[in-house]
Amino acid sequence: MKKSLGSLLLLLLPLYLFSSPLCDLTFKLSKSDPFINEEIILTLTAKQKDLSSAIFFEFIKPKSKDYDISLINKEEKRGKSQEKIVTFRYKILPKRSDDIEIPLTLKAKQASNASVTAFNTGSADELENLKTKDTLLDLNPIVLKVKKLDKKVDFIGDFELTYKIDKTKANQYEPIYASFEIKGSGSHNEIKTLFKDMQGVEIFLDKRGELGYDYVFVSNKNFSLIPLDISCYSPTKKKYYKLTTKKIDLEIQNIDSNTLLDDNDSYPSSFEVGKILPYINAILLFLAGYLTSHFGLFSRSKKVKKVDNFKDKIASTKDEKELLKLLLSQDDIRYSPFIEELEDMIYRSKRGSLRSIKDRLSDL
């Protein structure tokens, strides 16, 4: 019990690594015995002691093939006596097992308060040209005891996978929307996509942040989304686990032209208007958009000039597929007739003009 209490006190008390006439330095490491590729956080704080001058602190980031280190943020504040307190937060990713030594060096850049006041106009770039007296403060290095996992994993930490799909049955070439998101804390390998190319299926991906995946699938035949099986390890629970999904079967229904027209120009007895209503709506929307843009209906006498980033994206698309992908990503009913027209050009080999579509989109 005495040994446990002593260890707890060591964790709670700050560790002063270095003290000089200029400043006091402390550091905190989120974990000293990580696994390979497990993200840990180094927090380094410099507290100014010499108040007769202005001091700027800069952490000298070490470089090594044994680990990756990158800045998360840097915060500055003033203490009760107006002393500067600077806190650096770095992410460290060990790349091999065994002991890894990481040197810690801080540069203290000292200048008179008068010169800083006269020189500084608020621009950080100008401070780079300020003449300072530089002092390197070499701290004791930190040592990581890096462990190796028994199995190869993509995620280290506690994560969960959620997903949703708008439908499992669709008509030929009708877009199917699906979203996948991985949430949690820890570190992970880079995952560019969850689904590789599938024969006969057009896949459009829009990533949200690092672990959000919004997909659009388009096909003229039945297909399936393979089950996901992502390997993980939880250091807190000390166990391996997986992020999984079930196999998702997508049924694609053929569009029978005989249900729309017959030789006698009459409706079949089993005809259901609801089946072709979406296509009627798409045609009407297309005609309305075309007539409005062609004849200038409802146009204002004065047009307001403004920068439209989305219209710039439309203009920069190189072909029909790239424009179709862009419009599908918006999920806007105004683009339905244009999506239908592009799908006719791409998948049904119908003639059309990409330039005409872009021009009509720019008039929306």
Image (cartoon, rainbow, N blue to C red):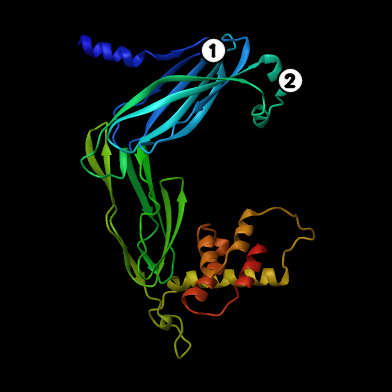
Q: Which residue is depicted at the point 73% across and 20% down?
A: 118
In this rendered view, identify the residue nearer to me: 192 or 152: 152
45 lies left or right of 145: right
* Residue farthest toward the right in the current orientation of the protein: 301
* Label 1 crowd bin: few (<14), some (14–19), many (20+), radius 10 Å: some
195 lies left or right of 237: right
Callout 1 secondary element? loop
- Is 274 drawn above or below residue 49 in the view shown? below
Query: Looking at the picture, which amino acid does disc 2 mark?
Result: Ala
**Image location (x, y in percent) of residue 310:** 61, 56
Quarter of the image where the C terminus is located: bottom right
**Residue on which the image places disc 2:** 118
Q: Which residue is depicted at the point 43% across and 54% down?
A: 214
- Is 131 drawn above or below residue 188 in the view shown? above
In this rendered view, identify the residue nearer to me: 143 or 194: 143
Figure quadrant of residue 139: top left
**Image location (x, y in percent) of residue 155:** 31, 42
**Image location (x, y in percent) of residue 167:** 38, 60
12 lies left or right of 130: left
Q: Which residue is depicted at the point 50% across and 72% down?
A: 343
**Residue on which the image places disc 1:** 22
Quarter of the image where the N terminus is located: top left
Q: Mark 2 vs mark 1: which is more N-terminal?
A: 1
In this rendered view, identify the residue nearer to me: 82 or 15: 15
Residue 281 makes an appearance in the image? no
